[in-house]
Image (cartoon, rainbow, N blue to C red):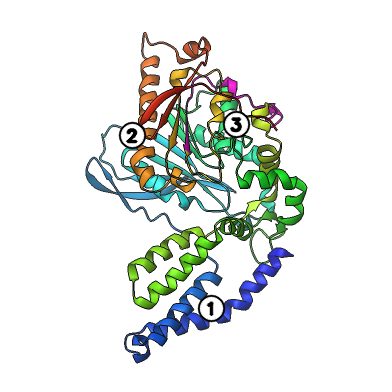
Amino acid sequence: MLYHWYEATHAMLSPYRAMADATKLALSNPVNPWSHTPFGKQVAAACEVFERTTRRYGKPDFNLATTLVGGERVAVTEKVVWSRPFCNLVHFQRAVPRGRRPDPKVLIVAPMSGHYATLLRGTVEAFLPDHEVYITDWVDARMVPLAEGHFDLDDYVDYVISMLHVLGTDTHVMAVCQPAVPVFMAVSRMEAEDDPYAPTTLTLMGGPIDTRANPTAVNKLAHERGTDWFRRNVLTTVPFPHPGMMRQVYPGFMQLTGFMTMNLDRHVDAHRDLFRNLVKGDGDGAQKHREFYDEYLSVMDLTAEFYMQTIERVFVEHHLPLGIMRHRDQPVDPKAIRRVALMTVEGENDDITGGGQTLAAHGLATSLADDMRVHYLQPSVGHYGVFNGSRFRAEIAPRVMDFMRTHAYRKAQQSAPGGKSAVAKAAGAKPAGLKMIQGGRTGSGALHAPKKD
């Protein structure tokens, strides 16, 4: 019934949104003398704030029409190269000259946690000049008919493996936030089966590999409430007339409510600032607000089975660090990873994925040689700063790119005649330490298992 009430409220507000939009349009017209009065400006600003806070935001566009390649601006075209009911694999195809040496292939696995893949627009933009970029464009569960079947954590892992098979060898995969666990699972299974299409490198960014390490408010809430509470209170059924009607989901508006209540005062202040900027005619400030919230308020539903399995296995029972995670009844053992170089990235001020939760991946992939793994801690950034923003572009992205190219070259050298096998080298390695980088400083630190509950 929760979803039905949400839809009914949205429908009931439609006439008022239309009235507010018309009033704003009339009072913003310079021909109208009221548009130049303080009263007219305040009413127009109030109408825009009301319309924006009560509308439903559709899926945004990436809007990456061009990029710089070798100092020249080239066109970029989005092309779907693989498709399943719950995901499309999008390739950002660059119009590069023929005969140019191919750039590294990068699969960016976007989070399936309420927002669309366009949240990683800045991530894609940073990698486009020097890489062939692919991204997982997850489909809103309310748009998938019930006849298409279910989608759970096992399906997620299958999707990742299938996409890596489509992209072929010498692919780099980067999991941003939530997908760190299923991507780590996928690579573990591929290595266990000696899959030739296992990626060259795996980069985990701000992901909850082990939420027992430095638990955040989000982690504590999940652990304290337990799975039954979430099943009773946040799951609902998609109503008519959406294509996915009757599908049980964790709705995007519930996820958005959770996001916003974590920093409610900040969001209230932002909308108050929007009103003030509109009244005083600060177009740049108002436009920055629109651009941010057009993305932030665009949310999608998750299937109930995927959401509940994630809560249970990742946040409550900690299957991966405890060694009991399974995929299709097969054990998921990160110790099988020997050929895939591993990089983890964390933000110093991350209040969603606490420090050490992503680093924990190195303590699980113990068969990996020390020179094939590195951890980077970015000072002064929160969760979103791990994959977006000025520090990401200046500090994080260059290090990830260098890591990918270094190990691509290493793999090519080992595959050449007379080269040493990475598998043979890793098999005899004993993981005594880990290369740690923080804000441009490099050091060596031993891996420590997180404290148990």
- Amino acid type, callout 1: Arg
Give how far across and how far down residue 132 sits, in percent: 37, 39
Question: Which residues fall within the magenta stretch?
Answer: 324-346
Residue extending farthest to the bottom is: 33
- Mark 3 touches mark 1? (CB < 8 Å): no
Q: What residue type is labelled 3?
A: Met
Task: In this rendered view, identify the residue nearer to me: 439 or 233.
Answer: 439
**Magenta segment includes 337:** yes
N-terminal label among 1 and 2:
1
Q: What residue type is labelled 2?
A: Asp
**Disc 1: CA contacts within 10 A as few (<14), some (14-19) or many (>=20):** many
Q: Quadrant of the N terminus?
A: bottom right
Name which of mark 3 and mark 1 comes first in the sequence: 1
How far is the residue under mark 1 from the one under mark 2?
Answer: 48 Å
The residue that disc 1 covers is 17
* Badge 3 element: helix
Q: Residue at x 53, y 25 (%)?
A: 362
What distance separates the C-alpha of mark 3 from that of mark 1? 46 Å
Q: Residue at x 33, y 67 (%)?
A: 284
Circle 1: element type: helix
Question: Which residue is at the front of the view, 99 or 17?
Answer: 17
Numbered tag placed on residue 185 in the rendering: 3
Residue 212 x/y as whole percent: 64, 35
Pointer 2 local density, CA inside 10 Å: few below 14, some 14–19, many at least 20:
few
Q: Which of marks 3 and 2 is in front?
A: 3
Question: From the viewer's perspective, is the residue at label 1 or at label 2 nearer?
Answer: 1
Indicate yes or no whether the magenta region holds residue 145: no
Is tag 3's residue or tag 2's residue first in the polypeptide sequence? Answer: 2
Task: Residue under label 2, please give it.
Answer: 103
- Closer-to-camera residue (44/182): 44
Where is 71 relative to 193, above or below? below
